[in-house]
Image (tube, helix red, strand yellow):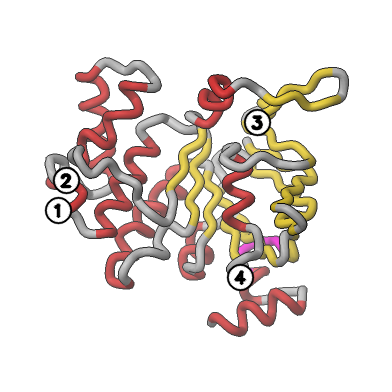
Amino acid sequence: MVIAQDVHKWFGQLECLRGISMNVEKGQTIVIIGPSGSGKSTFLRCINHLETIDAGRIIIDGELIGYREVGGRLRKLSGKTVARQRSQIGMVFQRFNLFNHMTALQNVMEAPIQVRGLPKREAREQALALLEKVGLADRSHHYPIQLSGGQQQRVAIARALAMNPKVMMFDEATSALDPELVGGVLEVMEDLAHEGMTMIVVTHEMGFAREAADDVIFMDEGVIVEEGKPEEVFDHPQNERTKAFLGAIV
């Protein structure tokens, strides 16, 4: 479903991603861990072309993201085409970014109506079902200010799911939440993983990684240092940098 081939990203003189390659099969949950500044979030933003890559390729469901290949060279796609590609990639950020003037229901309905052209009645039915899925059926008519941070993040997940994405990405989706609110969001994410949603998750929640991940990737300084099954990476890390990182957080 997702193929990254030798992806590089520079910010000025800083090479943030130094040759990242990764394959994600349909239905897999890949969890990326690592210290702050290791390139994890930048890599996610490159996958959905919120950041442009400087070398390499990213392919989702057989389609090159952000570019087309002409005579062996990459040419940038139009903004409209990139927007279409991006609509197939669900993204949940640290901050919820909900529309404050809209209810939870309206937040979830908006993109399917405006982007997918879904009839309002159908969008409403879908949004209500998704809010029920994330445990917020009784909060559908509440505005963001009336919801806790965890509830707002679950609305953000429902909003991303409303676009019927091919892959869901989570960029430290619980890091801005109070500790007692984290569990509800992780539970929704675990349910999605067990249902077979293709997911790439950047997180510091090691319990989630152990429980929900098919494979865990440890990144540091813009490279993949180690990857494997959760029990392999957490219980028998091979790289000294991985051992040091896990030793510091466990």
Q: How far is mark 2 from mark 1, CA to CA? A: 5 Å
Look at label 4 and name its amino acid. Pro
Q: Earlier in the sequence, mark 2 or mark 3?
A: 3
- Categorize mark 1 by other alpha carbons within 10 Å: few (<14), some (14-19), many (20+): some
Mark number for residue 143?
Answer: 2
Look at label 3 and name its amino acid. Ile
* Residue 10 lies within the magenta run: no
Q: Residue furthest front?
A: 12
| Residue stretch rendered in magenta on the structure | 226-231
Q: How far is mark 2 from mark 3, CA to CA? A: 35 Å
Mark number for residue 35?
Answer: 4
Q: How far is mark 4 from mark 3, CA to CA? A: 27 Å
Q: How far is mark 1 from mark 3, CA to CA? A: 38 Å
The total number of labels drawn is 4
What percent of the width, then of the height, locates residue 23?
Answer: 70, 44
Q: Find disc 3 in the rendering and name its residue.
A: 65
Residues tagged 2 and 3 counted as in contact (Cβ below 8 A): no
* Most foreground residue, 134 or 7: 7
